[in-house]
Amino acid sequence: MKNATIQRVLRNGAVRFGAIVLAVLVTLAALAPVLGTVDPAWLDAVNMNQPPMTKADWTGPDNQTAPRTLLMGTDSFGRDIYSRVLYGTRISLVVGVAVAVVALIIGTFFGLMAGYFRRVDAVLMRVMDGLMAIPGILLAIALVAAWGAQLSTVIIAIAVPEIPRVTRLVRSLVLSIREEPYIEAAISIGTPTWKILLRHVLPNSIAPMVVQGTYVCASAILLEAILSFLGLGLPSEIPTWGNIMAEARVVFSSAPHNMWFPGIFLAFTVLAVNLLGDGLRDTLDPKFNKRGVQR
Amino acid sequence: MGAFLVKRILATIPVLVIVAVIVFTLIRLVPGDPAAVIAGNMATNEDIARIRTELGLDRGFFTQFLLWAKGLVSGDLGQSFFFKKEVTALIAERLEPTLSLAFLTIVLTVLVAVPLGTLAAWRHGGWLDRALMGFSVLGFSIPVFVLGYLLVYFFALKLDWFPVQGYRPLREGLWPWLHQLLLPAITLSIVYVALIARVTRASVAEALTEDYVRTARAKGLPEARVLVRHALANAAVPIVTVIGIGIALLIGGVVVTESVYSIPGLGTLTVDAVLARDFPVIQGVILFFAFLYVMVNLLVDLSYLFLDPRIRY
């Protein structure tokens, strides 16, 4: 990428906001163990349903009791919400990035195949139409139900509904790029097809794919939280934002804050990723700029 | 046009067949012996054998699919293990709440999003436009269940304007039905309003740059008429298209919203079925929703004929 492009991207307000919020979240996730957290799965039965900012005597896994300020309170089992929310950041970010990577790799492969080989195109795109006819949440739910919920299966189950969209995008890019004169030139000097795809078609599709990747990441983070919230995602002892909120439902009328803290983190994360995507789209994708009305 | 109708309707068949294959394959993805997994830990060998026969798992993949597809075509989605009922009967029972929620959401959305988007495009760059764009980014980012609980907290728990949870069927009267359903429908419509207002704004703004709009203004038509009859009418096709595409989003949102508000519809049925590993029900619900989605988009395609007289297939 040229220096001028990088500068243009970095000057965009949405990109800046998104990047800063995400940098803070990544730091929180990475440093979770040293940010005054306790074992997120540990429950102290004496301190059940404590409101935020309670100064309590907290008994840890080592049976030592020490005074501790419960920043975000505790849940109905006596687990520390602050620790669970911070550790939950890890799951959300890992799922978001992993789903985006998996969906982009598989979708790009399919898209290149469909865009370049006519015969593959007909069959593959019909399958993609079928996949797209099933609402994403339902497909992910059904896949998790079949495979059982672990981190790896949740990631793949969320990635599957995203694959058709990436495939369609890459296919349409390939279809327009293959008409360019430089492809004709490459063919005429006898460049093998795989080399044309990897050297010429793929590099010219990177920018829209990065933009698409951020949107996939945002919707994956939401979808993981939804699965956990419905009680269908990762096992409830694993601290995910969705799991914290699923437990908060039971005591919602008396302790609504258990819902708000993970909810705020979730909304901010998704907002940051979406804004990053919007900013990248505006600065990287010249087609969107030309239309004017998109802004 | 008759030929187009037939062609377009026939074009839905391959999609539905592929959906059926995907849904059928689902249960075969269960690692190990699906029958044993479905039967659960308490099952005896006889139970497992019975389930295997019921599901046809003792036969070859292809035979199984043909048998299952034959049932599908005649409207037989199989038997629920958990509810001990026909899947079609279960879906029929749970249909009203879900359709009510979806219908009210679409009505609310169109009533709010189309005027908002049109006004934003009219005063392009003005305060309403900026507010709408900000709102639409927010709308895409706030998870529907967080929003649901926020609304419950303020409007049901604090202000006591609406009931917290549940559903009242339409036969108990229009007002009880609406009163109970309004909060869930508002919750669900936020993301949908964000989507449709954004598209309305973009396509109306584009239409407003056209020559016929200048002509309409030049001949002294009132601005409202220019906006509605000339700009909005010409922007209708993309708006209706995105309403159709948004149905997938809506169906996903229905599952979550029903869960938040304890509405006994197809969404809660899906969640219960997954928790009970009741695969015939999971398959039935997915097939039903996919069918609905394909049909709505068929209607959307057909509506182009009325919305845009230039489109003649």
Image (spheres, coloured by chain):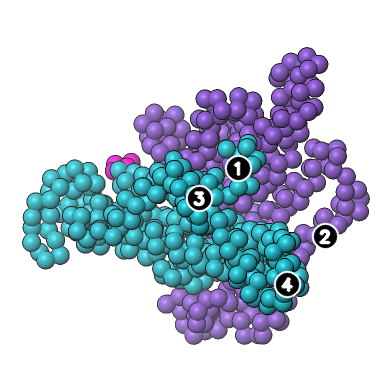
Chain colours: A cyan, B purple
Residue at point 48% right, 46% down?
A8
Q: Quadrant of residue B228?
A: top right
Q: Are marks 2 and 4 in contact (CB under 8 Å)?
A: no
Q: Are marks 4 and 3 on the same chain?
A: yes
Residue at point 86% right, 57% down?
B7
Instruction: Tell me which segment is drawn in magenta.
Output: A251-256
Separation of disc 2 and disc 1 at Cα?
39 Å
Q: Nearer the viewer, residue A20 or B159?
A: A20
How many C-alpha atoms fall within 10 Å of the one at disc 4: few (<14), some, or many (≥20)? Answer: few
Mark 1 vs mark 4, foreground winner is 4
List the residue tagged with mark 1. Answer: A289
Q: Are marks 2 and 3 on the same chain?
A: no
Q: Position of residue A36 (x, y in %)?
A: 18, 54
List the residue tagged with mark 4. Answer: A187
Q: Is residue B226 above or below residue A217?
A: above
Q: Is residue B13 left or right of residue A252?
A: right
Residue B88 visible in this rendered orientation of the protein: no
List the residue tagged with mark 2. Answer: B10
Q: Amino acid at mark 4?
A: Ile
Q: Is residue B2 left or right of residue B21?
A: right
Chain under callout 4: A
Mark 1 vs mark 3, foreground winner is 3
Q: Secondary structure at mark 1?
A: helix
Residue B123 visible in this rendered orientation of the protein: yes
List the residue tagged with mark 3. Answer: A5
The question of residue A255 being in magenta is answered with: yes
Q: Earlier in the sequence, mark 1 or mark 4?
A: 4
Separation of disc 4 and disc 3 at Cα?
30 Å
Name the chief secondary structure element in magenta: loop
Residue at point 65% right, 68% down?
A112
